[in-house]
Image (cartoon, grey):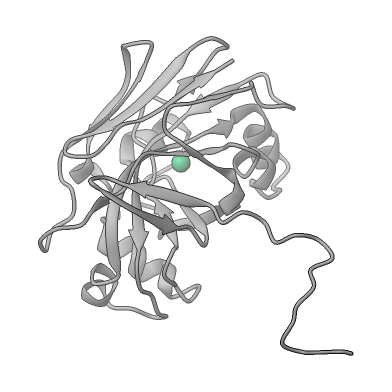
Amino acid sequence: MWNDRVVTWVVPPPEQPFLPILGQPGRFAVRRIYCVGRNYAEHAREMGHDPFAEPPFFFQKPATALVHSGSTLPYPQATADLHHEAELVVALSSGGANLTEDQALACVYGYACGNDLTRRDLQAAAKAARRPWDMAKGFDHSAVIGALSPHRGASWPDGQISATIDGTLRQSARLSDMIWPVASLLAHLSALVTLAPGDLVMTGTPAGVGPIARGETCTVRIDGLDPASVTIQ
Ligand code: MN
């Protein structure tokens, strides 16, 4: 007998990607991962662009690309130039469209350290051909994100952000060096899509991006947050 209250999946539903939360057993269910291009002036210049010429632009990684801190990953397929990008990650507990900056900040659940792993050779080829960045940015295991720190108070983190490889400093900047601060980024993004609970936004990387070789460990640190570390096999 057909019954519309009983669902039979012909393919099992996928596992729900999540982030652990510092200091509590709860989990943050991840819905989408948005990323921002060129949000630090020195990094925009190192990639050959005028940092102040255009509004922020966005791309996505699939939520299934999420990898927790402490993971060991195989060197990604289809690249010979895997790069690290240290980034502040913003996690949303509410959303909406066409938000003001104040409304956008009220959607923030918390913050984490992230590494926007990038197949730089594929990105360069995509840029040269004026093609999308998806295969350079949205590949398997490409979003390394640490435990979430719930947001406290009215301001966002304003400390130092860094990336080290096997202890050697590769990227270092202040979060206040962002061209588009968190509230402005979220407001811009909400003019393009309706933001929702579970969305993550990786807020761009400072100068100093570079390769991670096999056998190396890359650690992203931000003052006051749990580090995000990954080892490439
Ligand atoms: Mn990035």
Q: Is residue 83 above or below residue 202?
A: above
In the foreground, 126 or 80: 80
- Quarter of image, res 154: bottom left
Is residue 167 left or right of 35 when viewed as pictured?
A: left
- Quarter of image, res 80: top right
In the foreground, 211 or 156: 156
Is residue 33 left or right of 4 when viewed as pictured?
A: left
Percent of width and height locating residue 178: 27, 47
The residue that appears at 49% across and 56% down in the rendered structure is 34
What residue occupies the far front of the structure in this picture?
A: 1
Percent of width and height locating residue 4: 77, 89
Percent of width and height locating residue 74: 63, 22
Q: Quadrant of the N terminus?
A: bottom right
- Residue 35 visible to an observer of this rendering: yes
Q: Exactly how many numbered labels are in the figure?
A: 0
Percent of width and height locating residue 198: 44, 64
The residue that appears at 32% across and 42% down in the rendered structure is 40
In the foreground, 88 or 130: 88
- Residue 179 visible to an observer of this rendering: no
What residue occupies the far right of the structure in this picture?
A: 1
In the foreground, 115 or 4: 4
